[in-house]
Amino acid sequence: MTEHPEAAPGPQHPRRPQFPRGAEYPEGEAAPGGYHAPDPGYLHGPPPPPAQPSAPGGAPAEEQEPRAAGEPFRRSTPARRKPIPAMRGGGHGRLIAVTALFVMVTGGSADYLSSTWRAALHLLFWAGVAAAALITAGREQRNGWEPSPRWVWPTAAIGGTLLAELLIALFGSPAIIAGSVVVAGLFLFLVMLFG
């Protein structure tokens, strides 16, 4: 038994001649049919120009090997960094939605909470609207946007409180809960319809 499988000579075909380096056909001009291997420059393009000295002392720059297809590409120079401007939100949809939700929750829980807790809910709502107004004003100043109308924020705070108390005085909590379910269902239908 031989030590290595390549050491043993393989079976020779009687009509197939064997050439050096294990090739079935000879290389170069002796290939059958007049075909021959292409020049190495044909596959890889013309030879690269001689390297220019890039170091201050006149030392030649490092020669780069040609890249094969499929090698990962890495930039040698950094890409330009262009800042992406912050986009301004469109409209006051979130403010309207939060105000409507506040009216639904406060009106629906009026019969089950004391007036002190209801007043605390109003104060919490006002604090949230004031914080949102300050954040919006800060973003406008930081990004250089045109200032949006300021009357929207106090109108939402005072209007939400007055609407909740008016609905509590006129209809009571059960009717407000039923109306809230209808309004929320209609809103969800529109969201699913228009995406």
Image (cartoon, rainbow, N blue to C red):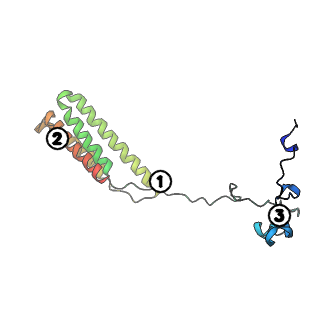
> SS of the residue at dot 2?
helix
Q: Quadrant of residue 116?
A: top left
Residue 177 pos. (x, y %): 18, 36
Q: Amino acid at mark 2?
A: Gly
Q: Residues within 10 Å of mark 2 (few under 14, many from 20)?
A: some
Q: Which residue is mark 3?
A: 54
> Residue sitting at 34 percent across and 43 percent down?
130
Residue 47 appears anywhere in the view: no
Residue 125 appears left or right of 41:
left
> SS of the residue at dot 3?
loop
**With respect to residue 118, does 35 lie above or below?**
below
> SS of the residue at dot 1?
helix
> Residue sitting at 27 percent across and 34 percent down?
121
Q: Which residue is mark 2?
A: 179
Mark 3 and mark 1: Cα distance apart in space: 45 Å
Mark 3 and mark 2: Cα distance apart in space: 78 Å
Q: Quadrant of residue 6?
A: top right
Q: Quadrant of residue 194?
A: bottom left
Q: Residues within 10 Å of mark 1 (few under 14, many from 20)?
A: few
Q: Which residue is mark 1?
A: 142
Q: Amino acid at mark 1?
A: Arg
**With respect to residue 184, does 112 lie above or below?**
above
